[in-house]
Structure formats: structure tokens, C-alpha cells
Image: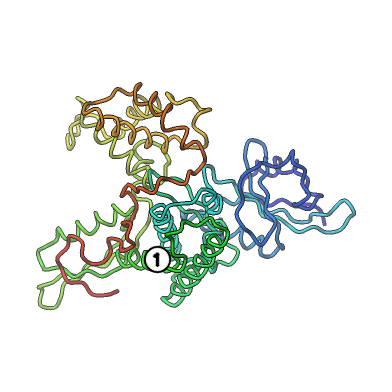
Amino acid sequence: MALQISATNPEHPALLLDLPWQLPLEEWPDRYLVPLPRGISRHVVRYARAGDEVVAVKELAERPAVREYELLRSLHRLRIPAVDPLAVVTGRTGEDGGPLEPVLITRHLNGSMPYRSMFETTLRPATMHRLMDALAVLLVRLHLAGFAWGDCSLSNTLFRRDAGAYAAYLVDAETGDLHPRLSQGQREYDLELARVNISGELLDLEASGALHPSVDAIAFGEEICRRYDGLWRELTRTSVYPAGKHHYIDRRIRRLNDLGFDVAEMQIGHSPNGDTVTFVPKVVDAGHHQRQLLRLTGLDAEENQARRLLNDLERWMATQDDYAPGDPLTARPEVLAHRWVREVFRPTVRLVPKELRGSMDPAELYHELLEHRWYLAERAQHDIDQDTVVKDYIATVLPKVRGPLPPGDGTGDGTGPMDGDGTGDGDGTGDDPEPESAD
């Protein structure tokens, strides 16, 4: 059988042809490989260079390779955070003419790290809480889309920095299955697997001495369940409001937006005697701030990064003479937003030389500079000019964050979707005084 490369982009097969498909993956020469940290996998996985791209190459049997490729493509269409599938290579033969296993090829997620690499420096408990937040958000997003993971774990997840928090991406979809809608039993099964897997992984780290002494591996495994339950309830619960209190519905939608989710459809019904209104969010879609930033500026960022950049954009627009909200005769927000990118965002990022940024993307770097500007201004009790901020950041902060995903200082910044004690903000005690019925 001749070598076959099935790819999502017609340009990729030509780039991939240069790789040594006649050799087993574990025997590939170093000149083809990129030395990036790898997580634990039941398959042989290598990072290689294909043209200007870095790709992850995984050997596995043809049927699961094609199936995972299609599942990852489906998740990509659903805008779920997962690695980007590029190709499946089949029909491989060795130099002796014998068959070799097919491979699945995905794009390397820039700036991401597997959890074991993060634990090379012992993570503090507060940083681990943020990882649990990120993983809970990912699992909720998968379940809302009808995807049963079947093997949720730290090993099957990559993490990226996201404006003081973390964003989690699915890596391994081999055991997954996509449905129109998940039952409660399917969700609970996924969650139980996550609890067991995470506890086991942390116990393994504890045995190797890489776990912070104050971290209870079993308790952290159970924490993913608490965080998931709190977020799921906040996103899907039915709310009952007094009639005439329609602003409660607006407040609920704003709270969902603050969590990073959009309500694409809602169901509102009055009680028979008209004294209450029932509100049910029917379709909840993630990436609220991402889409808003992309629409206004063309910048593609993680959710927390987008929230931070939008806040800075709004403050900047308020200082512009041609900004008058609600006045159609003045400059539209999109015009001002593109001017902010051109006059503020890009010049600020370019002040930090590329060779000093490590693998930090521009949005994360801009967030870091905003944080540092606030810190310097608080210390000096007056505004600090941008050149001074950047010079001080390069000298005092950048050396500590040069890695793709430094382990953090454990202080937290309150930007995550749930607070650090694992209770979340979906416990029914928010700012709505109404009684609620379970979904």
C-alpha cells in the first residue's frame, strides 16, 4: 500500500513528505525533531518541524487514528479548545518493506505545557486551584457540546497562560464520543473518571517528590467535581424571578458573560397566576470576550486575555475626543478599536524585543505589561510612562517568566471563572435574591 497523507489543508502534504516516514517514530533522527516537553502517553509521540510549523506526531493504529482525526475536526468546528488536527498518514512501510503504524499529526499548541513539565518546579496550591478551574471549564464546554471525553486527566490536557489564569486544551480525543446531547449519567461518568485520574496522577507526583507538601492528592481529585458542578449549575440552572423584575434576567446574562459564556437562546415563561417569571438559558456558548475582541480589533486571544484587553480598550476609548457612545455621527467603536490596536497595542508589544519574549503571545505580554504598570504606579503613587514600564519589566519581571508556561507564584489574581476555595460563584448566593428550581 502506497503512502497516503489525508490533510485538512492542501499545503500540508507537501511539507509533511520530507519527514522520514520509512522509520519507526522512536527512531527518527534528531535533525527532524524539536526538543519540546512531552507528557505521558500510551503511544509514541514526537515533535517535529514541517516547514515553518512544529507538529506533534503520534503513532497508533489506523482506525483510532482516523477516528481521533475526525473527532478533533468536529471539536474545531464547535470552537472547543483542543489541538488542531492536520493530517493522518497511512500506508507506511519500513526500510525492510514491513508495515509501520499510521500516525496522527496535530499542530503544536504554541506556549503550552504538559502538566508534568509544570511540576518540575513544585507548584503552590493556589496555582493548582487555577489549573482545576481551567480543566473544569474545558470539561463543561465539552459536555455542553455533547462530547463525552472518556479519559479526562491532566495527562490528556495542555495548559496555556491566560492573563493570570490558565486555559486548558484537550490533547487526546481517542476515547471520546460526540452526541447531540449528553445524559446526566454520561456527564457523571466523565467526572468520576476525571476525579480518579487526577488523584492518581497527583499521587504519582507525590511519590516522586514533585508535589507541594500541603497538597492532598485525593482532595484535589475531588475538587474538580466541586468546581465542575458549580460552573455547570450556574450555566444551566432554571431561575424563577418575581414578575416585573426583568432586570434580574439581564443581571443573570451579564453574570454568564462574565464567566466567558454567551446565551444564544433563552426560554422565558410566566407562571399561571402571573406572579413569577421562569428563565432557562437554552444554549450556552463559550468565548464571549474572545468573539467581542475579535469583532472589534481582529485580535485573537484567550478568554481572560480578551477580557483584560477589552477593559483597557474601553478606558482608552473614553479618553478620545471622537468617542461618544450612542451618537451615530461620531466614530464607531470598531474604528476606535482598530486605532487602539495601531497606536497603543502594537507599539507597546514591540517595545519588548522578540528574542526576550520567550513563547509568550502578544496578548499575554500586553496583559503582563498592564499588570506591571499598575504595580509601579501603586508603588510610586503616580502614573508611570510606558517606556519606564517596559524597561523595568524587562529588567525585573521578564527573566522570571521567559518559559512557555512558568509555574506561577501562587498568589492568584481573581480573574479565573471561580474563586480559589473551590466553591465557585454558582452556589445560588449571587446577587439575585430570587428562589431557584433545579434544572
Q: Residue at x 71, y 62 (%)?
A: 62
From the image, which quarter does the C terminus lie in?
Answer: bottom left
Q: How many marks?
A: 1
User: Is residue 316 visible in the rendered structure shown here?
Assistant: no
Left or right: 281, with 392 as reference point: left
Mark 1 residue type: Glu
* Residue 94 x, y percent position in the rendering: 84, 53
Q: Residue at x 30, y 64 (%)?
A: 423
Q: In this rendered view, identify the residue nearer to me: 230 or 347.
A: 230
* Residue 111 x, y percent position in the rendering: 52, 42
* Residue 417 x, y percent position in the rendering: 33, 55
Q: In this rendered view, identify the residue nearer to me: 290 or 423.
A: 423
Q: To which residue does mark 1 refer? A: 223
Left or right: 182, with 238 as reference point: right
Image quadrant assignment for residue 135:
bottom left
Q: Residue at x 30, y 22 (%)?
A: 385
Q: In this rendered view, identify the residue nearer to me: 424 or 309.
A: 424
* Residue 420 x, y percent position in the rendering: 33, 57
Q: Secondary structure at mark 1?
A: helix
User: Is residue 250 visible in the rendered structure shown here?
Assistant: yes
Q: In this rendered view, identify the residue nearer to me: 343 or 244.
A: 343
